[in-house]
Image: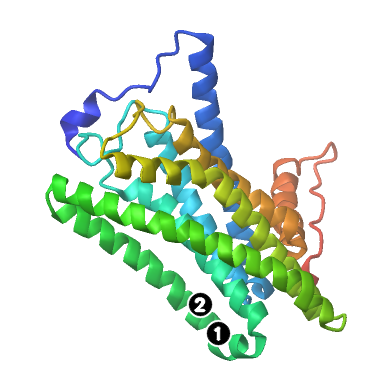
Amino acid sequence: MRNSSLQGLSLALPLTSFGNVLLFLFSVSLASSIIFLNMSVCVSILLNRALRSENRFMYMLSTCFSDICTGVSYYYAGVLDVKDSLDSPTRTYLVVPTFLGLSYMAILAAQADRYHAVASPFQYSRRMTRNRTVVVICAYWLYAYLIVAVNNLVAVGVAQRITSIGSFVGNIFTVIIMIGLNIRLFIIARFQLEKEPPSVERDTKRSSVYLVLVVALFFLATWLPLFCHVIVCNFSGSVCFTFKNDGIDPIRILPRLNAALTPILYICGCSPLRATLLTKVWRPCCRRSTSANPLGVAEPLLETSALD
């Protein structure tokens, strides 16, 4: 990014009206919430060895890490007066949009992983070890930034055509695959799991399937407006309506809202993650900040070795 383009950076909206102040506070609060919630989930997974041994939590970790980057970058792309497009002098060279794309790729991969685990449990246990899951996660991160590198090496016009065609095709297949897999996962969770005898494994499968379904439904609700916008623009051959920056564009605010909602769904829908978060992350941090009691003695931390 050129130094000349950075010198004149200012807020997206001047703080001269009550509405502009509210929008500024909303953007800053959204970015901070995304970072705080996803960082909390990341730290919880990293601190608990039992969580790290399960593939679904590795996908959660990938989603949360990309969303942390989304939250950090939203201070720039959502708060400041920048236009993150291919021909803008204040663009991020597709780095910021790719963080959102990685989050959505992680949710797709997690849904496919849960479908495989429930539909073919014996084959899944042999095929998808944790190391292979890590390879899959690294592969789509590498793929995403290889595409970024290619788009930055070609001319702007060529990059725009590559991005529009890839987004158009990818959005159609994503919607079809996600809706189809959601329906199939619901059928499996509703009927096939009921046939299994009661066990901890069955309850784990059911809760993980339901969690993926809820996350996918919120994902579709927040991303479909942007998908439809891209498809309509590609069919019409126009740029459609544009906004000053991502923090003013409602259809680009929604995916950022999803980045804040997803860790909340993870915490609410997964009891082992919630227990680790409360006992190993939030409660110790709160006690450290208020450890100086009137007697000057710090309270002992809660014993949490049973969670490992």
Q: Residue 215: percent from the left, percent from the top?
A: 63, 55
Mark 1 is surrounded, within 10 Å at the Cα level, by few (under 14), some (14 to 19) or many (20 or more) other residues, namely some
Q: Amino acid at mark 2?
A: Thr
Q: Quadrant of residue 7?
A: top left
> Between residues 43 and 231, which one lies in front from this camera angle?
231
Q: Going 43% across and 77% down the picture, which residue do you hit?
A: 135
Query: Which residue is identified by label 1?
Result: 129
Q: Going 76% across and 40% down the picture, which residue do you hit?
A: 292
- Callouts 1 and 2 close, C-beta under 8 Å: yes
From this viewpoint, which residue is outermost toward the right? 198
Judging from the image, what secondary structure is the residue with disc 2 in?
helix
Question: Is 119 situated left or right of 238 in this image?
Answer: right
Residue 244: in sight, yes or no? Answer: yes
Q: Residue 111: percent from the left, percent from the top?
A: 57, 67
Q: Residue 127: percent from the left, percent from the top?
A: 54, 88
Mark 2 is surrounded, within 10 Å at the Cα level, by few (under 14), some (14 to 19) or many (20 or more) other residues, namely many
Residue 62: in sight, yes or no? Answer: no
Q: Quadrant of residue 182?
A: bottom right
Q: Using the numbered discs, state the Cα–Cα distance from disc 1 to disc 2 in whole angstroms.
A: 6 Å
Query: Which residue is identified by label 2?
Result: 133
Figure disc tally: 2
